[in-house]
Image: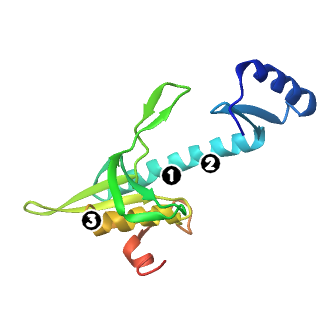
Amino acid sequence: MERVEKEHKEEIMKRIREAGDPENYETVWERGIPKSKKKSKIKEGGLSRAQGARFELKVRKDLEEKGRIVDKWTNNVEFEKDADGQIIFSTGKLIISRKYNPYNKIFVLGAGFPDFITLKHVHDELYSVIGIEVKMNGILSKEEKEKCRWYLQKGIFPNIWIAKKGDKRGEIEYTDFSKKYHNKE
């Protein structure tokens, strides 16, 4: 679709109101293109994000109780893609992860991968460093797996753990990425 001119925007909105159901649908403009979204799905997405944020805080508190120093990791890995859209693993580079929200005119800094970096004093000047990615179901996307492999290969993190909800209420399970995804894909 092409970008919609301002003078056509009112006409499009009028047609949407006449044909659609404004009680159940909301029209949003993304880069000048109108998109109708179901209000129940918008609410569901907001609830899921809030639930994920609460679980992240719970994981952070659990790690701190276990004697680890926890900090939010604000960097990310950026890969180039070839003509087919496949990730070129060798071109990965570490970037500062800032997401720009044009509506609030602010940069969001909490969008790094993995979610946390944890440190624990072992002895003398030796520390255990682990990257923690928090996932409610414990399943990483293909791109997240590539990022984990890149971090491990470059030696930025010696270990990356995936935190997920356990079987019992309130339980948190930590899985080592290297053990779970070793030689897979």
* Residue 59, above or below 185: above
**Can residue 73 be seen in this snapshot?**
no
- Helix, strand or loop status at disc 1: helix
The residue where tag 3 is placed is 154
Q: Residue at x 46, y 63 (%)?
A: 87
Relative to residue 20, is residue 116 drawn left or right? Answer: left
- Helix, strand or loop status at disc 2: helix
The residue where tag 1 is placed is 55
Q: Identify which residue, 62 or 102, lies in the foreground.
A: 102
Marks 2/3: CA distance?
33 Å
Q: Residue at x 70, y 40 (%)?
A: 43
Relative to residue 134, is residue 13 drawn left or right? Answer: right
Q: Amino acid at mark 3?
A: Lys
Q: Residue at x 41, y 57 (%)?
A: 79
- Percent position of residue 54, x then y: 51, 47
Which of marks 3 and 1 precedes in the sequence? Answer: 1
Of circles 1 and 3, the one toward us is 3
